[in-house]
Amino acid sequence: MEKREQDILKKIEEKTEEIKVPDSLMPEQIEKLLEEKGVQKKPRIKKIYRYGSLAAACVALAAGIFLAGQFGGETPEDMDAAEVKAVEEQDTEETEENTDTYEKIYAYLKERETEAEEERGFFDTFRDSITSGGADTAKEAKMEERVAEDMSVAQSAADGGSYSKTNVRQQGVDEGDIVKTDGRYLYVLEDGSQCIAIVDTKGGLKKVADIEADENCRIQEFYLFEEEKKLVYAGTVYEQDDHWEDTSKKGGIEEDVLYIGQDLLNGRESTKAVAIDIKNPEEPKEVGGISQSGSYVSSRAAGGYLYLFSRYNVWGKAIEGNPRTFIPMAGGDLLREKDIVLPPFETASMYEVITAVNIESPSEISDSRAIFTDGGELYVSNENIYCYETQWNSGVTETTSIRKIGYKDGRFSRAVKGKVKGYINDSFSIDEYGGNLRVVATVGETNSVYVLDKKLDVIGSIKGLAEDERVYSARFMGDVGYFVTFRETDPLFTVDLSDPKRPKIIGKLKIPGFSDYLHFYGENRLLGIGMSVDEDTQVTDGVKLSMFDLSDKTDVKEENKLVLKNVYSTDVSYDYKAALVDPGKNLIGFAAGTEGGEKYFLFGYDEKKGFRCHLSERINGSSPNAARGVYIEEVLYVARGNVIEGYSLKDYKKVDDIIL
């Protein structure tokens, strides 16, 4: 669950604390209603509120009560030992495969399908009772719409070179983006997400070529592999219903048609990665690609390999005994039994499908895995992939399960499982260093720091930090970690992690407002981007930039700050790739919402003069994606959708533009 979703739930709880609960909605009446409808009071009834917490909160707001708090939750239990053994990944091909794994997965899915039917029946009855009681369904629908809008989903590689690169989470692990450059050409994902424009910047902006995806494919992001002279784009393929109707009537249909039918049967979505030869950027040529089940989630690139992540949902589909109806595919083949891991929680509803592709052979999958999940998040270090997800129990006792899979040269290794109390704010709050994993989590009304070893066993922790606040941002460097919590003030905590078994807080700075993005800015400085908050009214009153002095880790100071009045939000708050942060060129750039529309801001920093605003220009172009600022030599290019505008980095005046 993302921070904005957590904010919404928190606000709902605060707004409904004083509202009287109607007698018809008291727990005993709900239990009576269940009995009348023939729904037995099994433990799984409580689980409705774990994986449906946001939906339940929306219904509760319409009814005038946050119902999730009225029902107890369960503590997650470890998987049955037999299940672990049946699906545990093996390190070598010589290991004997578990031939009954598909059957166990099928049995698990059918059991959950039965539970889901009962739960749907409960919600139907529950919704009817609320509606008859006068619930404001229009308000409920509006709330659901706002929730959907808010659920939209680093260390910078740029360090003063001749051109900028994507702001990534982990140094040494590249990430896809919607705008990239190789130092001469700009590659821009156009509005509509089906075409990547190649624009030559030499002698003025000029579009020289297009890379077009298939009609039913939407490109999410792409990579530039400069050494291999390739561009690789990744996205989701949406098949049409009429295709499914045609293939479903066939009896003995061919393998490739079966693959299409399987995609349609299970959500009609698949993920595609396509490699394009760009030795001559003006004549791009497709040279290969792969597909896998499920919609595109994310990807990473390291060591000449692309690691692709998709989410494959099987609930609500026509699951049959044939593995093709419930097992994901990669490269046209079903994943092997031993490459599938059952869930840590009983409510998992989908697969996280992971594949590795050699950029030199982009039509071949070198390895693949699938992990059952209930919809978690992702962090990729230089050696391991971490999939983590939180089990919510009435918003009171959250537990986050963490799965680790090693990767190297396109091959995956054995999975390891662990867990911590609380929920993780985002991928910057989880970090690998020296073989250990460091985690900052919010636990109920407090916060904790955990250190886990290679087996994901907790070996050190600090608990009970910042009561009545929650983590907004975090950043780690070596043996030191920094994290910000907020409710009324902005405490910046400094954590000494040099002894993994005995982490300790060595500094705490309290200032108004909060930083929801942190970025190291040269030696002994930490940049914070967030919001200023009025100390009296607790209302945000503008975007805030902070520069923290880290020279004394035990006494961190806010060296300088700048509040942008009438600037209400930044894309960086939810999309770190939207940040251009380059200490070498002394550039801090991002898009932000203002009274006059969205603008792109560019700042420099001076220890004595503080932040200096070089550029504040309206962003043109239309796209659901956040604007990007990239530079080549002494020109900054701001791109959004089909519009690119260039500004001189010498006098910050506009020098060029193009409509694609």
Image: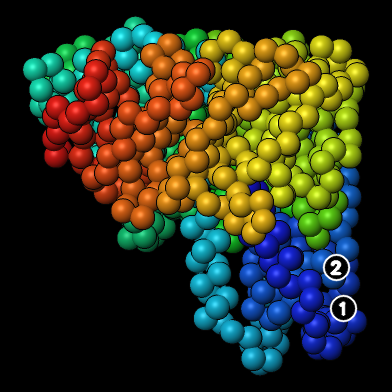
Rendered image quadrant of residue 104: top right
Label 2–label 1 contact, CB within 8 A: yes
As drawn, the label of residue 71 is 2
What residue appears at the point 86 percent right and 85 percent down from the top-left corner? Answer: 29
Depth check: 467 or 71 in front?
Answer: 467
Query: Distance from label 2 to label 1 (Cα)?
Result: 7 Å
| Residue 189 appears in the figure | no
Is 358 positioned to the left or the right of 282 in the image? right
Mark 2: secondary structure: loop
Question: In this rendering, is residue 437 above or below 27?
Answer: above
What residue appears at the point 59 percent right and 61 percent down from the top-left corner? Answer: 316
Is 125 positioned to the left or the right of 364 in the image? right
Name the residue that disc number 1 marks: 27
Q: Quadrant of the C terminus?
A: top left
Kind of residue at badge 1: Pro
* Mark with earlier residue (2, 1): 1
What residue appears at the point 55 percent right and 69 percent down from the top-left corner? Answer: 143
